Image (cartoon, rainbow, N blue to C red):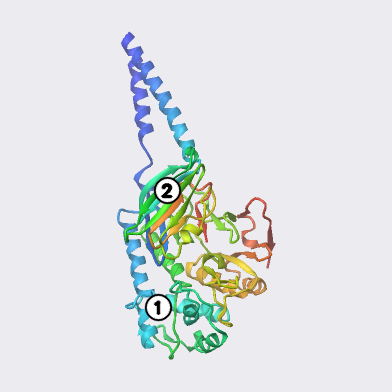
Amino acid sequence: MIRTRTWVIIIAAAAVVFALLSIWMLSAKQSGTIAEVIQDGVILREIDLSLVTREYSFTVEAPDGGFNIIRVQPGRICVSEADCPDLICVHQGWLNNQGSPIVCLPHRLMIRLKEVTAVDAVSH
Amino acid sequence: MAKKAVCLLFMLLFLAACGSSPASREHSADFFAMDTYMSIRAWGAEEGLLPRAEQLVYRLESELSVTRDDSVIAVLNRSGSALLPDDVIPLFETALNLCEDTGGALDISVYPILQAWGFTAEEYRVPSETELASLLESVNYRQIAFDPATGEVSVPDGCELDLGSVAKGYTADLITALLRDNGVTSALLDLGGNIQAIGTKPDGSSWRVAVQDPAGQGYLGVVNVADSAVVTSGGYERFFTDESGNTWWHIIDPATGYPAHSGLLSVTVIGKSGVICDGLSTALFVMGRDKSESYWREHRDFEMILMTEEGRLIITDGISDSFTPAEGMTAEVISG
């Protein structure tokens, strides 16, 4: 009898923890600050820009041997350097929670926000 | 009693673990094609449907690309005549009708001019006036001989065509038809910034489509749509600056051979047909504000959002309830 009651309490507690966890996960998902670095449809990195505390950079190698250097700062991300012919990705500047994704066509690279704040798509 | 409570709790936990039903599952495809980035998100699609949509895009690209030697358009430009495949005939017909209907503001024969400015190879230069004048002689969509029944098309010497101004919109229409025929009632296509919505979101609410601010990083506003295409053209998309500091963009006025300076920075067209929205956004950009307004009053089968060089945001009254300007922006509404 006592054992049954203990189980009820444990499971009830687990249910409460699950409920709190799902609420936290759902609300975190809507923050709109997770940047995805995608090459040819494959997600290379997911970076939660709201958790970035200091600046850092990393290099993405392109299939054709080229490169893009990606700079991450608290709340924003950009391509700081690349060896593509048009440099459109570099000139596009910082991607914050507005604006269209950064695209480097020659290197088939894209950086976009996972949940652009309350918008489903951008016409441009 | 206590055992019953344990069972009940377990059942609740299992229920919570059940996600959405397979019918409403989201499928997505992201890929590069037609010199741009494309993404498709669809709900309720069968396995394998989006790869078919992707293949459809690659097939159209191989038929339409002006820079691929073996495409039917490249063959036409090289030899002066070609036989269009069945799935390109409706596109060609619609494009020619749009050229006529917009009084030549859209002209699919402007390709030699685009080449002269270097927009096709991204080796930019400012052509001389004499060079442009001589090239302009062969720019005129009326010289194109086309038989929609057979798909036979021919052009005179020096005349070259490019369907770049309508190809993405047409592709979106074909993907839309493919998805619909296979039971998809909710999908969002993004073909390099050409947006096309099928139905509403799975929860029944409208899709929220932002319009890029041509002069900055943010948006002009957000428009709520269902079953619509939203296509934007603007000089900001592709341009270069010459040694004297002049900015030249890729939308050419077929009447002058120079990049169109009509007082507009961007034009967004919202309507049912992707191909019409695509072609119209270019044509209206060339026409400028006043002519665009008259064109809209005559047709009334699309809506538009114009951004002028003076920073005025103008929308048509059909979207006055569904468009929300960005913070700090006010939209002037024009009515019929």
Residue at point 38%, 28% (across, down): B12
Residue at (59% x, 57% y) in the render: B216
Give the left or right position of residue B278, taking residue B286 as reference. left
Q: What count of labels does the image hold?
A: 2
Residue drawn at x 68%, y 56% is: B330
Q: Residues within 10 Å of mark 1 (few under 14, many from 20)?
A: many
**Can you say which quadrant of the picture contains the N terminus of chain B?**
top left
Q: Nearer the viewer, residue A80 or B170?
A: A80
> Tag 2: Cα neighbours inside 10 Å, few (<14), some, or many (≥20)?
many
Which secondary structure lies at badge 1? Answer: helix
Percent x, y of residue B300: 61, 69
Kindly identify which residue carries mark 1.
B89
Quadrant containing the C terminus of chain B is bottom right
- Residue B307 at x, y = what percent? 63, 64
Q: CA distance from mark 2 to mark 1?
A: 39 Å
Q: Quadrant of residue B3?
A: top left
Tell me if residue B149 can be seen. Answer: no
Q: Residue B219 is drawn in which quadrant?
A: bottom right
Residue B50 seen anywhere in this rendered image of the structure: yes
The residue lying at 35 percent from left, 77 percent from top is B86
- The lab-note entry on whether marks 2 and 1 share a chain reads no
| Residue A59 drawn above or below residue A28 | below
Q: Tell which subunit mark 2 falls on.
A: A
Most extreme residue toward the top, as rendered? A2
Closest to the observer: B100 or A46?
A: A46
Provide the chain ID for the residue under circle 1. B
Q: Position of residue A76 (x, y in %)?
A: 51, 46
Residue type at tag 2: Glu
Q: Which residue is mark 2?
A: A36
**x then y, percent, for residue A118:** 53, 47
